[in-house]
Amino acid sequence: MSSEEMYLLYHGLILPKETHSLESLKFAQEFTFKDEDVVAVTYPKSGTIWMQEILPLVLNGGDLTPIQTIPNWDRVPWLEEKRLAVVVDQLASPRALVTHFPYHLMPPSFHTSKAKVIYVIRNPKDVIVSSYYFHQMAGFLDDPGTFDEFINKFLEGRVMFGKWTDHVKGWRHTELGDRIMYITYEEMLQDLPAALGRISDFLGRHLSEETIQKIAQHCSFKNMKANNMSNFSLVPKVHMDPDKSPFLRKGIAGDWKNHFSSELLARFTSVIHKELGSDSVSLPWSLD
Ligand code: PPS
């Protein structure tokens, strides 16, 4: 399939047609956010489906029903994807959504509402590795080529949702004040109960230690990998082939060390540093 057949272009971003359409993007722009909505924002491969597991559990005091009975894409749908229009009327209140949209493409009602935002950042070197394997297993994405070639595409923003640096910078400088909370994938890995405590306080839930521990257990990599409602095993192999690479692949920080040569690392770091400018000082991990 040619890349014109696979992707559509939306405000300069390439998006896979399998999951996005001009109608779904119009639906997103016209979507009416409610004050009690919660949206997790991620650049792809930064912890989206992890938040699709965490948010319903935190919002419902640890009730396991949603994560055991509803596939992740319907439970906490993507704002920009086709499924939202199908399931929007069935979403339990308070509604949880995810989005990969850059800040400037969020719909008007998002800005006038009081909906809360959790922005998850992941080390871009691990993002690119995760994305590289995802392109191999997802039948609706183009062949990533060699890792070296894929790095070039990533750095030039010729990948889904554009440049990582634009996404991070756009969401760092918002008018959202205390409506937005930032968290890193690495922080969630290092101490999930502490991260869940922060999320639950931000959402005004103030869960007990016992509930936090229960949620942490159900959101572990191992348990999510075993949960058919979250591991994409319900998706036909032609779209996602776990024999090529599972969606829940390694779930670690630092896998980039197994993929970057010192030359690639130097090139990657120099571009990211330059584009982030003064923003790089506030990132939680070293880019080197
Ligand atoms: S997507 O396609 O944008 O929705 O992908 P996304 O969910 O953002 O990112 C997928 C990566 O997140 C990892 N993941 C987890 N890591 C640790 N613990 C838990 N519970 C967890 N859930 C998802 C997933 O394994 C992908 O990372 P890699 O490095 O490929 O393993």
Image (cartoon, rainbow, N blue to C red):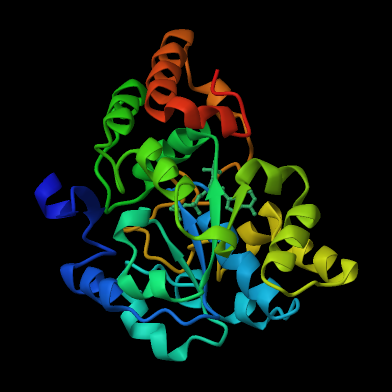
* Place of residue 126 in the rendered image (x, y in percent of width and height, measured from the top left): 52, 34
User: Who's the residue at 30% across and 72% down the image?
Assistant: 28
Q: Is residue 59 above or below residue 164?
A: below
Report how many numbered discs are placed on residues in the image.
Answer: 0
* Place of residue 104 in the rendered image (x, y in percent of width and height, measured from the top left): 31, 55
User: Who's the residue at 37% across and 65% down the image?
Assistant: 236
Q: Is residue 131 above or below residue 10?
A: above
Question: Along the horizontal axis of the image, is 129 left or right of 85?
Answer: right
Question: Along the horizontal axis of the image, is 46 left or right of 164?
Answer: right
* Place of residue 11 in the rendered image (x, y in percent of width and height, measured from the top left): 18, 53
Instruction: Give the position of the C terminus as an image quadrant.
Output: top right
State the image quarter where residue 181 is shown: bottom right
Q: Nearer the viewer, residue 282 or 151?
A: 282
User: Who's the residue at 37% across and 27% down the image?
Assistant: 275
Q: Is residue 148 above or below residue 27?
A: above
* Place of residue 240 in the rendered image (x, y in percent of width and height, measured from the top left): 38, 56
Furthest toward the bottom, the residue is 89
Question: Along the horizontal axis of the image, is 218 left or right of 5?
Answer: right
State the image quarter where residue 283 is shown: top right
